[in-house]
Amino acid sequence: MTDPTVLGRLACNLRSSEEVQQRHHDHRMFSLVWQDVGDSWRCTVYSDDNPERRIAQVDIHENCTVRVESYEPCRITVSPEEGILCLTRYKPL
């Protein structure tokens, strides 16, 4: 969070829509939903101020393949060993 290019960060447990740890310099807040879609789990992150505005969608497949769609500048880290997903938002260039 000390990096001047970082807008904010959120972290959650894999496959759980429970409590999300987040901190944002621009005071935006985000929610997420995990869905079991058969051979994968899908996490959709969206803005609380506009639930129709997706920030990112992450699909984690049974074979450990990860597919990410990002709609804002961000970095997404999936750590199966630690059981977390972390999304770091960046200021636009």
Image (cartoon, grey):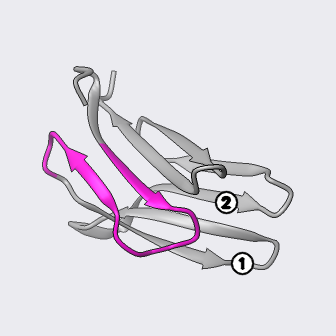
Q: Secondary structure at mark 1?
A: loop
Mark 1 crowd level (few <14, some 14–19, many ≥20, 10 Å Cα): few
Residue behind mark 2: 59
Counting residues from the N terminus, which is met first, the one under dot 1 or under dot 2?
1
x then y, percent, for residue 49: 20, 66
Q: Is residue 72 above or below residue 82?
A: above
Camera sees residue 60: yes
Tags 1 and 2 touching, CB below 8 Å? yes
Residue at image point 19% right, 53% down: 28
x and y, in percent, of residue 13 in the image: 49, 63
Q: Left or right of 44: which side holds 78?
A: right
- At mark 2, the secondary structure is strand
Q: Amino acid at mark 2?
A: Asp
Residue 3: x %, y % from top left: 27, 21
Determine the residue positioned at 32% across, 28% down: 92
Label drawn at residue 37: 1
Considering depth in this image, is 40 or 46 the residue closer to the camera? 40
Q: Is residue 71 visible?
A: no
Please state if 37 lies on the left or on the right of 18 as rendered: right
Point out residue 69 in the picture as x, y percentages from the top left corner: 58, 49
Q: Which residues are magenta?
A: 9-27
Cα separation, mark 1 vs mark 2, equals 9 Å
Q: Amino acid at mark 1?
A: Val
Quadrant (top left/top right/bottom left/bottom right) for the N terminus = top left
Q: Is residue 80 above or below residue 17?
A: above
